[in-house]
Image (cartoon, rainbow, N blue to C red):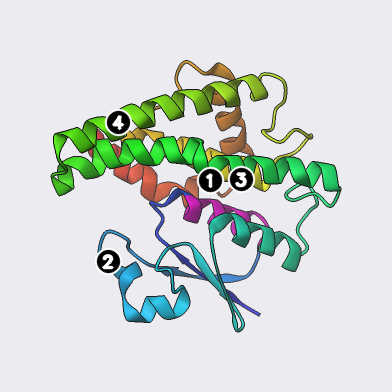
Amino acid sequence: MVLHLYVDWLSQPCRAVGMLLMENNVEHQVHDVKIMSGETRTTDYKKVNPVGKVPAIVDDDFHLGESHTIMRYICASRNLPDHYYPNDIKQRARVDYWLDWHHMNLRFGSSRLIKANFFGPIHKFPQQTIDESRKEGEDVLKSSLTFMEETLGKSNYIAGGNQLSIADIALASEVAMLPISGASCEGYPSVQAWLKRISTEIKSWPQVNATLDQFLASKDK
């Protein structure tokens, strides 16, 4: 049974799901859906995901959105190696902790900066809106990266253990996206070493991040 994956490769949650599938040779068919072109808001796409967001999957007659939930579902339905989403209840809780933490911390800070520094000029947001989003994003991102730095100073992987988990994949995809917002993980050596480790261990990293790399290269010109 072929799983259908709907993605925009510039989206960090989409890249996380894509890497999990590719790393484990899960048979799937990719459908490109461009957020900036409004393709997630079409009537046809909302038949796939009524919320109108990516990523989404269709597995036979089962439709599912939300990247973290999709990753958990893939781990269970495709019987992936235990380290991705451990069966041990305490180890699994650590992975769940970081997946839940991600939304209102690292991702929230990153999204505020993207709103201010990327979408602000494009959509001509009021300067006050841009300034407020930038300040909030910088504060939350600094706090988030500091917490990650403290954690990764004690462990090679964000949720502990000896191998990467889906929490590593999700958070690494977010950190790799920071340059779009004008931010980075410079000044956080443990986070930098972790990101390099994850991007090396995940063999599909270059393929999945090719669109992002091209976009960042075009910004530098």
Give the mark nearer the N terminus: 2 vs 4.
Answer: 2
Look at discs 2 and 1 and give the one toward the viewer: 2
- The Cα–Cα distance between marks 1 and 4, rounded to whole angstroms, is 29 Å
Give the mark nearer the N terminus: 2 vs 1.
Answer: 2
| Residue type at the position of mark 2 | Gly
Residue at mark 2: 38
- Residue depicted at x 61% and y 36%: 198
Position of 34 with respect to 197 (left or right) is: left
* Label of residue 134 in the image: 4
Give the mark nearer the N terminus: 3 vs 1.
Answer: 3
Look at discs 3 and 1 and give the one toward the viewer: 3
Position of 130 with respect to 76 (left or right) is: left
Magenta segment, prevailing SS (helix, strand or loop): helix
Q: Secondary structure at mark 2?
A: loop
Look at discs 2 and 3 and give the one toward the viewer: 3
Give the mark nearer the N terminus: 2 vs 3.
Answer: 2
Whether 127 is among the magenta residues is no
Report if residue 196 is visible in the image. Answer: yes
| 82 over 180 or under it: above or below | below
Residue 147 falls in which quadrant of the image? top right
Report if residue 180 is visible in the image. Answer: no
| Residue type at the position of mark 4 | Arg
* Label of residue 205 in the image: 1
How far from the left and from the top, in percent, is residue 11? Answer: 41, 52
| 19 over 102 or under it: above or below | below
How far from the left and from the top, in percent, is residue 217? Answer: 29, 38
Residue at mark 3: 100
Which stretch did the figure color magenta?
Answer: 13-25
Which residue occupies the foreground of this view, 159 or 34? 159
Q: Quadrant of the C terminus?
A: top left
